[in-house]
């Protein structure tokens, strides 16, 4: 166990140097609620760097536990629990893509973020990131699962990074 005087592991962010990942959002989807069991989120934005505005829509049916992501008429579906927010974010500044994050509070307040990418022809579910996400000032995503909240100083023992479109 390293002592408090040892330098932190190389690349490990300090907790105070992180912010909630939604602070990096490029655009939030505008959610539309009505009396039906399905509600929708909508936005328009160029998601794949082709200088063409993409029509982005999510449809959430919580009683059926279904999330449908449609971008320019191309769709993919996923089982969800309770969607809380959806937003676009540039998670890899080395590529031309803007990704869609759909945050789900989980069945018993155990949050997960579902990450989607549109490449111009298909919508891909890149994966899920567990926990309440934070981001360091270099754009690396940090899951709250990797924090030890009950020690002082607060310690980070793992984080999630997306490299070449894959969640590591």
Image (cartoon, helix red, strand yellow):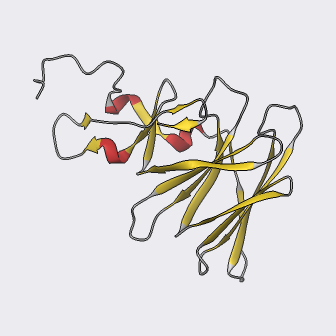
Left or right of 55 on screen, residue 3 = left
In the rendered image of this protein, does residue 72 appear above or below residue 63? above
The residue lying at 12 percent from left, 24 percent from top is 4
The residue lying at 33 percent from left, 36 percent from top is 158
Left or right of 165 on screen, residue 113 = left
Task: State the image coordinates of residue 119 (x, y, percent, origin top left).
Answer: 77, 40
**Quadrant (top left/top right/bottom left/bottom right) for the N terminus:** top left
The residue lying at 68 percent from left, 26 percent from top is 95
Q: Quadrant of residue 30?
A: bottom right
Figure disc tally: 0
Left or right of 54 on screen, residue 31 = left
Task: State the image coordinates of residue 138 (x, y, percent, origin top left).
Answer: 49, 23
The residue lying at 38 percent from left, 36 percent from top is 159
Outermost residue toward the right?
52
Task: State the image coordinates of residue 53 (x, y, percent, origin top left).
Answer: 87, 41
In the rendered image of this protein, does residue 138 appear above or below residue 146? above
In the rendered image of this protein, does residue 166 appear above or below residue 44? above
Task: State the image coordinates of residue 97 (x, y, percent, origin top left).
Answer: 71, 34
């Amino acid at each position: 166990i390293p002592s408090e005087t040892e330098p932190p592991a190389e690349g490990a962010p300090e907790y105070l140097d992180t912010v909630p990942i939604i602070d990096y959002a490029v655009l939030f989807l505008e959610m539309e609620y009505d009396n039906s069991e399905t509600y929708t989120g909508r936005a328009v934005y160029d998601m794949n760097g082709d200088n063409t505005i993409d029509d982005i829509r999510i449809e959430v049916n919580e009683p059926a536990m279904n999330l449908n992501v449609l971008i320019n008429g191309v769709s993919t579906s996923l089982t969800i629990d309770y969607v809380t927010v959806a937003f676009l974010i540039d998670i890899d500044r080395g590529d031309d893509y803007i990704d869609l994050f759909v945050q789900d509070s989980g069945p018993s307040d155990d949050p997960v973020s579902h990450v989607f990418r549109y490449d111009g022809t298909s919508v891909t579910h890149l994966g899920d990131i567990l926990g309440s996400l934070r981001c360091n000032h270099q754009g690396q995503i940090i899951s709250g699962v990797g924090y030890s909240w009950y020690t002082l100083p607060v310690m980070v023992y793992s984080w999630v990074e997306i490299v070449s479109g894959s969640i590591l």
